[in-house]
Image (cartoon, rainbow, N blue to C red):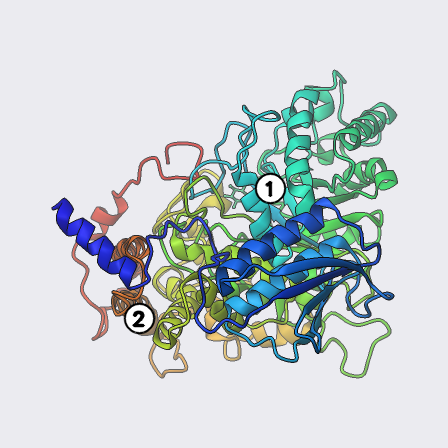
Amino acid sequence: MSRIITLLLFLLTSLGLRAEDGYRLWLRYDRLAGAPAVTTVVLATPGGADSPTLTAARQELQSGLGGLTGATPTITLQKTGGEIAAAGAEGYALRTAADGAVHISANSDTGVLYGAFALLRHLQTGRSLEKLDLTSAPRISRRILNHWDNLNGFIERGYAGFSLWQWFYLPGIRDPRYRDYARACASLGLNGAVLTNVNANALVLTPTYLAKVAALADEFRPYGIRVYLTARFSAPLEIGGLKTADPLDPAVAAWWKAKVDEIYRHVPDFGGFVVKANSEGQPGPQDYGRTHADGANMLADALAPHRGIVMWRAFVYAAENTVDRVKQAYNEFTPLDGKFRPNVVVQIKNGPLDFMPREPFSPLFGAMPKTPLAPELQLTQEYLGMSTQLAFLAPMWKEVLDADTWARREPVESAAGRGSTVARVADGSLRHQPLSVIAGVANTGTDRNWTGHPLAQANWYAFGRLAWDHTLSSEAIADEWTRMTFGHDAKLVQTITSLLLGSRETVVNYSMPLGLHHIMAEGHHYGPGPWATHQRADWSSIYYHQADAAGLGAARSAGGSNAIAQYAPELAALWGDPEKCPENLLLWFHHVAWDHPMKSGRPLWDELCLRYQQGVDEVRAMQRAWVSLAGQIDEPRFTEVQARLQRQADDAVIWRDACLLYFQTFSQRPLPAGVEPPAHDLDYYKAIKLRYAPGHPSDY
Ligand code: GCW
């Protein structure tokens, strides 16, 4: 047996397929056939002086160019002649000089570091250096990963192991992985990390932990990454000895001011706070009859002298509120527009509900013109199969970022609203707002390959690239990532990119097609649970699908909850009419009769069944596509993806059968031709209890 393995390893090695464990992510610097020689690289900054960031850039270029081209380049430092136009504070210019030297110039050391990674990416993706002349600058200034990591190492909704932050061993013992994390982030231009869960623990603000936070900040600083923390609103009570956390109480404001000053003594470039307040049991200003603005402004005033910011989350809804849950954030936040300090950003999940496989964009993006708004995206696939299933999320994020809010420009232009995309709201260009933020809930953990599913690395990559430049296409991002992570063979690139690009829609099809949402199993959120009822109506699936004998879907147009009215009139007119509403959002906005004719000519019920079947068929096609790459991918990654796709196929069948059998109790219609009959009855699926699923604090 072992002889066979040795032989196999020998064969693979001789084919150039070294065993991969995924640790290197997309920063693989193996020799690339045909890579152009780069003998000299000139790094140019205004000061021309060395720094830890330039050292990091040099080290990366030495190992990267050395590995890719087989020759270590000479790297020199220089002063720039003047400001590099269009590079801004963090951008870079890449240029090949007549003598063949590559110049990386920037207005800051971090810009040079980003330029170094861009040069490496250029080579890794097989592009030529001839006449290279490009300038690139980020469109959004704070590009931040949000880690929902607890101090005990558990990651809420984390499916790739435990927290990367080894709190017990810090500050003295520093895992080399911190540096590799920082390299990966910097390679994409990510410049911030919120270290702690939004369900916050005040302990991280105590001196013992601040020393640990400072150690992580020191590790990340050369890579241009600032640390941020989550602020537990009741911290003055829990660690400050105060009797209240009322934001309008001067003693509370003074406590936070002193605490913030203390943080900056530990971390001089601390980024600021993220706050989840009065949401899902978290404390907040409303506990004292104050508003979100009162709470945010109090913290913002403490941070302002240090140029820190507050990212105040708009993910709020309350059990006792009987208004449609998807309307609640808008109702609470729009009256506060214009009432926040300039260093407050309101951080909004992409959709009005909660990271479902498909939601319309949150109407808040079009409704708070005086406030900087940050999209919060979720890399960790809480509702899209965790790290077990493949779902490449760039297409989902692009769908939101490119969506036109139709928010009026000021002054109103002729084509009022046209072009007021979520991306332009986020990057501040629509209203010339200086502060811009984008946040992504990280999918990283201690798994050797960082993200559990080897292909989920692509979501980290895509988030970083879109945070830098939201105009990049999903196709371009998938192509880059595949070449850097797997190689350049045309069939391989074609196969993997199409797998990636179709995968999110496939998950939609077999789990929540046609605008269905929130019908997953309770607690861990993995797998179907359309029957789920909870003592909280807004945590029950039936609250969202509203299935009955007449039809299916949430009634949110004028005759229903009228959530549609939170959108611009142009959108409300489109989405509010079941005849015009895009079918992929139909059941989000409308309760539709089972026999409602769909665009295909089929009644809703048949269409629904066939979508679920299509999702299953697509996963099977993904499996076949992957298997067709046998021999072209190193064995560890090949086998791991293959196994996960098999699990995904099995789980897709469960989604289809469970949902169709359940909805059939209302529709009373037979499965149309082309849909495989379920292997079990409904009770079987209802009885499935997944125990100890990862990422969820309690059993299930
Ligand atoms: O969807 C919910 C998740 C919670 C999460 C919350 C939030 C961090 O199930 O685990 O808490 O969203 O975004 O605050």
Does residue 277 appear anywhere in the picture? no
Between disc 2 and disc 1, the foreground one is 2
Question: In the visual, does 588 lie left or right of 268?
Answer: left
Q: Nearer the viewer, residue 446 or 51?
A: 51
Residue drawn at x 65%, y 42% is 220
Question: In the visual, does 590 lie left or right of 492?
Answer: right
Q: Residues within 10 Å of mark 2 (few under 14, many from 20)?
A: some
Quarter of the rendering occupied by the C terminus: top left
The type of residue carrying mark 1 is Ala
Helix, strand, or loop for circle 1? loop
Rendered-image quarter of ligand 1: top right
Dot 2 and dot 1 residues touching (CB under 8 Å): no
The type of residue carrying mark 2 is Gln
> Label 2 belongs to which residue?
614
Q: Is 582 drawn above or below residue 451 in the view shown?
A: below
Does residue 161 appear anywhere in the picture? yes
Helix, strand, or loop for circle 2? helix
Residue sitting farthest toward the left: 1
Q: Position of residue 383 (x, y in %)?
A: 44, 52
Q: Position of residue 546 (x, y in %)?
A: 43, 57
Q: Position of residue 410 (x, y in %)?
A: 84, 71
Q: Is 13 drawn above or below residue 567 in the view shown?
A: above
Residue drawn at x 75%, y 26% is 245
| Cα separation between marks 2 and 1 | 36 Å
Number of marks: 2
Residue drawn at x 55%, y 34% is 165
Question: In the visual, does 317 lie left or right of 108?
Answer: left
Q: Nearer the viewer, residue 582 or 637?
A: 637
> Label 1 belongs to which residue?
318
Q: Is 473 drawn above or below residue 141 in the view shown?
A: below
Q: Residues within 10 Å of mark 1 (few under 14, many from 20)?
A: some
